[in-house]
Image (cartoon, rainbow, N blue to C red):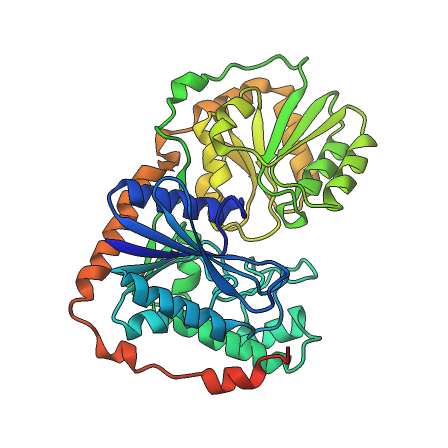
Amino acid sequence: MRVLLVSHGYPPFELTGVERVTERTARALTAAGHSVTVLSRRTTPAPTLPSMERSRYQDGVDVVMISGGGMAPGPFPGFQDRLERIFERLILELLPDVVLIGHLTTHSPEYICIAHRWRIPVVMELHDFYMVCQRAHLERPSGDLCEGPEGGRACARHCFPDQTDALGRWALRTLLFRLALDRADALVCPSEFVANYFRALGLPHEQVQVIPNGIPFTERPLLENYASVARSCEEPLQLASLGPVTPHKGAHVVVEALRKARLPAVRYMLFGALAQPYTQRLRKSAERIDGVELRTYGVYDPSSLPQLLANVDAVIIPSLVWETFSIVAREAMACGVPVIASRLGALSEAVREGENGLLFTPGATSELAGLLQRLDADRSALARLSDGIRPTDWITIGERTRKLEKVLKTVCVSNVEWDRRKAEEPDMKALRTLLVPTR
């Protein structure tokens, strides 16, 4: 198949979860014999209007970058008209069999309509809640969790109250992205939690499919290689968190829990991009706690995790927002390390409480402190949790790719009998033009 894969970022310019999934998907589909072109964004201060540039990366993946448009997202709508022209030009150049959308941040929801105009089916991956939430995590600036846009009213009231015509803008945004969801030929979710959220919006069950994200190990690690041994209570408890060190990921919850736990000695390691000044505040808080050693390591290569986690007793995922999958939970388990996680979103699908890990109420520092006290006093409990990890607790990238291939091939076959109604869709350009901010 000729596949056009759309993503908001692509390594080496962006290195967080979804971008890594996109890169792995592009490489895996290419290795499976498909022709893959990636359309991505690289937001830069200049030029003002986005423009297209081409480059080729390793492993046979052709990458088309849209550069410019400014570093920070502005009011919706913004540069959608320009982006749509670039997308349609690329469609006509490549004539792909299918468009696979990994993420639409900094892109246009009208891509689906454009692809359908040229009778090309679209599969959309839903890695988070961006299709209903500009902030992607259903989290308001106040830190409160949100149920959804309420037709744009919640967005205008809680997240963007200072924008001109806020209600009109976010009502339009909600409508356009909902139409994009309805138009997609298939929607792929990483977890039942995400799938159930979008099904509850009225999307057909058969349109929404679940394919877990794969972990980036070439082969399935043998859990026998990580045979658990209960370490002495005299040794410091070794804890780690993986992924971006940002407030919504909740590392400060762990630091506060360690303050309350008053353990004799504990080392807490953070692997991932370090947001400032948040990380500096974490360091200062940890320095004031006797027995706590906080170490920060920055961005890491996921293939190095077996070495980085070799002496770690547990990985903590203290998220304060709805987690839609959590690759790091599966990566930790594949290395034989149990997971302690917030009882939030899809984390309950990853962690079987008391078997391969433990769950606690999000943000409940006293509850987490109690768990850490018990584990520090009974190191054999950590060994039992490690032994409870099953090979079925994760899938590899190769396994995920084979599942995704089936979906792509199915929509391509279905495309032979094209539904003419897909071309008869409302045109919102006039309303969108009215709301475009003056530049």
**In the picture, which quadrant includes the C terminus?**
bottom right
The answer to whether one can see residue 92 in this image is yes
Foreground of the two, 284 or 224: 284
Foreground of the two, 141 or 379: 141
Q: What residue sits 81% from the left and 36% below the top?
A: 284
Q: What residue sits 50% from the left and 38% below the top?
A: 328
Classify residue 90 as left or right of residue 151: left
Which image quarter: residue 57? top left
Please state the horizontal and vertical placement of residue 195, each as a whole percent of the image: 39, 57
Foreground of the two, 124 or 248: 124
- Report the residue that reaches farthest toward the right: 288
Please state the horizontal and vertical placement of residue 206, each as a whole percent of the image: 28, 62
Please state the horizontal and vertical placement of residue 92, each as a whole percent of the image: 31, 67
The answer to whether one can see residue 205 in this image is no
Please state the horizontal and vertical placement of residue 170, each as a whole percent of the image: 57, 76
Q: Is residue 204 above or below residue 367?
A: below
Q: What residue sits 31% from the left and 64% below the top?
A: 93
Classify residue 189 as left or right of residue 306: left
The mark tally for this picture is: 0
Q: What residue sits 48% from the left and 17% below the top?
A: 228
Which image quarter: residue 395? top left
Classify residue 17 as left or right of residue 98: right
Q: Is residue 23 above or below residue 76?
A: above
Foreground of the two, 206 or 298: 298
